[in-house]
Amino acid sequence: MLFAAIKAFHLLALVFGSAAALGNIYLGLAKGPHDLAAPGYTNTLRKAWRYTSLFAIIVLWATGLVLMFARYGIWIPGFAFNAKIAFALVLTAIILFMNLMAPGWARRGGPPSYVPVLSWISAVSLLLIVTLAAFAFG
Ligand code: HEM
């Protein structure tokens, strides 16, 4: 019962995190000659997604570690889980970096040009993590 509740939080955090990851991708793809300039609007969305992803990744690690210790011990051997955690580390590093740097970028007139690449790496990592989780746990 408690395990199921914690797993529900794990999956709910994933729902919030995926909204943030895919939102950034859709916003990037929506750029085009037809765009109306709405920097305040897009910046508000980006900020909401940045905080959402920070909240989600913290909950994912907290609940994920508890689930692991409760059911499997100190580690889960096998390629799928190792790879899942490797991509989770990549995603975590990007989320922390973005949250740390974004206020400074805003003051200096906007994010550097490589930021959309980081958004793509985050979104692909998230999709891979979910796929690997399915293979790790059957
Ligand atoms: C972005 C990060 C993460 C995502 C998107 C994610 C996603 C998922 C998903 C979709 C499942 C369900 C898989 C299934 O039951 O078939 C799952 C289960 C699980 N995750 Fe994660 N996870 C993340 C991070 C972590 C971390 C950091 C850990 C531990 C260090 C972890 C440990 C677990 C465990 C132990 C289960 C299995 C629970 C069970 O036996 O039912 N996860 N995760």
Image: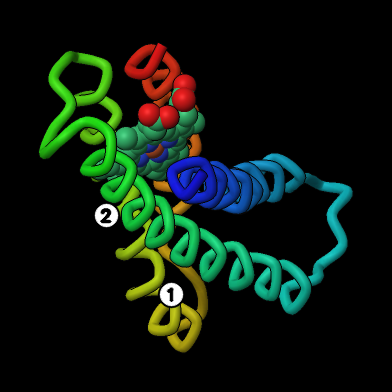
Residue 110 against residue 82 in the figure, above or below: below
Q: Is residue 120 above or below residue 48?
A: above
Q: In this orientation, which residue lies closer to the viewer: 15 or 48?
A: 15
| Figure quadrant, ligand 1 | top left
Quadrant location of residue 69? top left
Residue at left 59%, top 72%?
Answer: 47
- Report the disc number at residue 93: 2
The amino acid at mark 1 is Ala
Residue 122 makes an appearance in the image: no
Task: Inspect this view and state whether residue 98 appears.
Answer: yes
Q: Secondary structure at mark 1?
A: helix
Task: Rate crowding at label 1 as few (under 14), some (14 to 19) or many (20 or more) other CA atoms within 10 Å.
Answer: some
Q: What separation in Å lies between label 2 and label 1 (alpha carbons)?
A: 14 Å
Q: Is residue 129 above or below residue 59?
A: above
Mark number displayed over residue 102: 1
Q: Depth check: give the residue in front, 27 or 2.
A: 2
> Eyeballing the image, is 115 above or below 43?
above
> CB of mark 2 within 8 Å of CB of mark 1?
no
Q: Residue at 48% across / 66% down in the picture? A: 55
Dot placed on the residue nearer the N-terminal end, 2 or 1: 2
Q: Amino acid at mark 2?
A: Ala
